[in-house]
Amino acid sequence: MPIDANELTLDELAIALAPAVADSAVFDGWSNAAVDAAAQMEGVDPDVARLAFPGGAMDMIAAWIASIDRDMAEALPAPALDAMGVGQRIRAMLVFRIEALAPRHEALRRALAIMAMPTNVARSARLGWRSADLMWRMAGDTATDLNHYSKRAILSSVYASTLAVFSQDESEEFADTFAFLDRRLKDVANFGKFTARFKRSDDERFSPMRLLGRLRYPAR
């Protein structure tokens, strides 16, 4: 069904167009040409479509991430997640995201290259944090202390390192990526026990920075 741009704000239009832009980015890169092609596919005036991405490639990528966030929330409602443990919920959401990205593998590769540019690193980190925050909230996290921030920082790191592997993965059905993800989740050990770890004595306290260091330079 064509997108009715008249019924959407520009932010909503950007998210609605983002999957089609990602499809076109496989061939045209994250460019105005990809936006024009997506607009044609979705029955939107190309001039209006371009207005939805005033910041260029990073706006397109941010909208794509937002569309995956939206789809994840719709595909994994609370009743479905309630039957799982916390660690299982987090893994289910990460697996959903990887599977959602799989048909647009080349678009992801190009997106990661743009996000890694020095001028885009800060915004890329914010986008990763936003997705991690959504996943933790969907998993039922209500922490408001330091634990709140450590969980999101660690999950952002797990997801970013997994995407880096996924973007280069040529194994059958991305088996290497899922094996890597499971190793990273094992490194984190048990998401549901973070709070208990932070309440231990200083000598035994869990160190987010130490774990992030291990996740940044993991053993493959």
Image (cartoon, grey):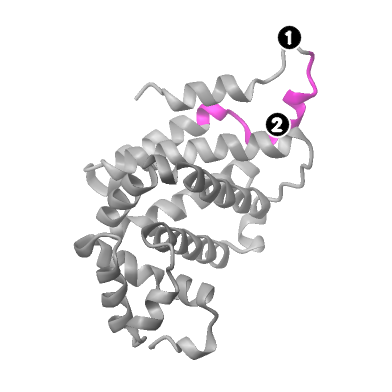
Looking at the image, the residue that sits furthest to the left is: 27
- How far across and down, in percent of the image, does residue 87 sit? 60, 41
Residue 193 circle label = 2
Residue at which label 1 appears? 203
- How far across and down, in percent of the image, does residue 165 sit? 33, 38
Q: Is residue 200 magenta?
A: yes
Crowdedness near tag 2: few (<14), some (14–19) or many (≥20) residues, C-alpha within 10 Å = few
Viewer-proximal residue, 85 or 148?
148
Q: What residue type is labelled 2?
A: Lys
Crowdedness near tag 1: few (<14), some (14–19) or many (≥20) residues, C-alpha within 10 Å = few
- How far across and down, in percent of the image, does residue 26 sit? 23, 61
> Is 13 situated above or below 211?
below
Q: Does the magenta stretch include residue 188?
A: yes
Q: Give the range drawn in magenta.
A: 186-201
Label 1, label 2: how far apart the Cα atoms are: 17 Å
Residue visible at 58% across and 51% down in the picture = 130
Residue visible at 56% across and 39% down in the picture = 155
SS under mark 1: loop
